[in-house]
Image: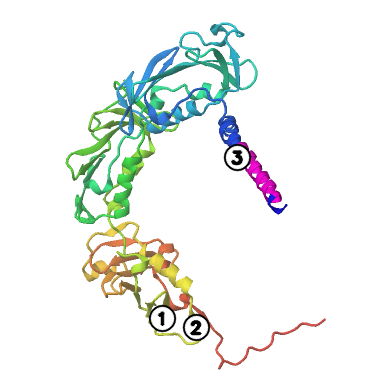
Amino acid sequence: MVAAHFVVKLWRTLALAIVVGALGAYLYIVERPRVADEAAGDSLIELQPKDVASVTLVYPSSPAIRIERDGDDWQLREPVAFPADDGVVERLLDQIAETKVERRIKTTEAQSFATYGLEDNGEQARISFTTSTGTKIPDVIVGRTTPVGYSAFARVEGADDIVLTPLLLHTGIKKTVLELRKKRLFEVDAQQVIAMRIDDAGRAVALERRGDEWIIKSPIESRADPEQVRDLVAALNEMEALDFFDAPPADYVSTDPSALAFRATLAAGGDVGFRLGKSVESTPPSRYLERSSDKLLVKIDDATKVRFSKDVNALRDKRLYRCDSEDAASIRFERADGGSFALERNGDAWTLEPAMENATVRDAAVRRAVGALVTLAGKDVAMDDAKSESDLASFGLNVPVNEVEILKADGTSCGRALTGVKEADSASASYYVKRSDDGLVMTLPSYLFSRIDVRRDDLVDKKPDPAAPPSPPAAVNTP
């Protein structure tokens, strides 16, 4: 009896396992592909953008545009030979590949192609594709928009139906040669630049890299501001054409001796650069530019001139200290008013020397002060080589108001700066600063002078003195 019950139970278990297995197989083989297809939607065309090697765009009223893949980049082949904007081409292919069909109309039930603007190359465009293996993908023909709604008619060459697609496809596939051309004019590795020259309105400034530093070679020899040098290379790489010219416009002047010209010399050899032409009335304001390497003539944003119009004063290194906040281990303030002190770093904390009784150092205030000091720079050059007593006295630097030196942990100096004030008690007070190791005197706006004119009281919280007599109670007025 027990054995018979065991056989029946085993049979039921096996039957249930067979049913579950069959259900699982049905879901995997039949329902899974169907659900996946429904999730994917009804695509206009089966297209893998990464496999496309060439695209041809044919429009009714303009020359055909042919683009070919060249390694990782795209190149325009017709109607001009020019590097293409990779991002624009890739987005175009993605848009076509991701377009979903909203409705299909069998050709046996539809009117003529002309009714939908789908005859020949289409009212909007015909798009042809070839893959990297040489396979030709069926053309996509885009016609007119629907009378109502936000859709457009399209068809795939060889298919037996007409489809409705989102209006986004209709507008997105219409590209001009200008849109497809690569607008970025320069791609320069900043580490490869070893020299630069700016000619502007008859003035020339030459710069040269020496190791990790940049030096102004002419019209004077001086350290260059690394931030200004980096901005020149960045401005070069960020320059984009607003328009291209196959022939110079009638109002273009390429021989203007006062036109700004820029040249960068590369370590691998050769130069890159440009010459600016006259400004053009447009929105935004623009001007002509001629690229030196191939005489390519373009129109660029007029703001480009401002980024390259740098004179010696703008390019000189006017920093007072050459280190970062993390490098500062000791800061010494020698004040003419007798309030000299030092800040000493101990791990992440700072201490005052000499210490102040009944006061605690405000770490946040010290960090702000250190950060403000290491980035401090003069504004304008007041004198290039002030060394004599009379020279220094003319800027109040013969008896400095304050001398501030920043030291690293190994004792090396990041710099020592001297500050001077003229007519300190008047509304027209002037502030000056000078590095101790050269004669360059620079002006300093009052708000920047406050960053270096630091006092101990600015960096501490004072506690009440327990020995001090208590304050008298405040008077109370009674009616």
- Mark seen at residue 21: 3
Q: Nearer the viewer, mark 3 or mark 1?
A: 3
Quarter-of-image position of residue 24 = top right
> Which amino acid type is shown beneath numbered disc 3?
Gly
- Label 1 to label 2, Cα distance in Å? 10 Å
Q: Residue at x 38, y 82 (%)?
A: 338
Asked whether residue 425 is in view, the answer is: no
Q: Which residue is mark 2?
A: 359
- Camera-side residue: 238 or 334? 238
Q: Nearer the viewer, mark 2 or mark 3?
A: 3
Q: Secondary structure at mark 2?
A: strand
Q: Is residue 3 above or below residue 303?
A: below
- The image position of residue 319, as x and y in percent, is 31, 61
Q: Which residue is mark 1?
A: 352
Residue situated furthest right in the rendering:
479
> Badge 1, how many Cα within 10 Å: few under 14, some, many 20+?
some
Q: Secondary structure at mark 1?
A: strand
- The image position of residue 19, as x and y in percent, is 64, 39
Label 1 with label 2: CB-CB less than 8 Å: yes
Q: Secondary structure at mark 3?
A: helix
> Badge 2, how many Cα within 10 Å: few under 14, some, many 20+?
some
- Residue 18 belongs to magenta span: yes
- Label 3 to label 1, Cα distance in Å? 79 Å
The segment highlighted magenta reads: 4-23
Q: Is residue 451 above or below residue 29?
A: below
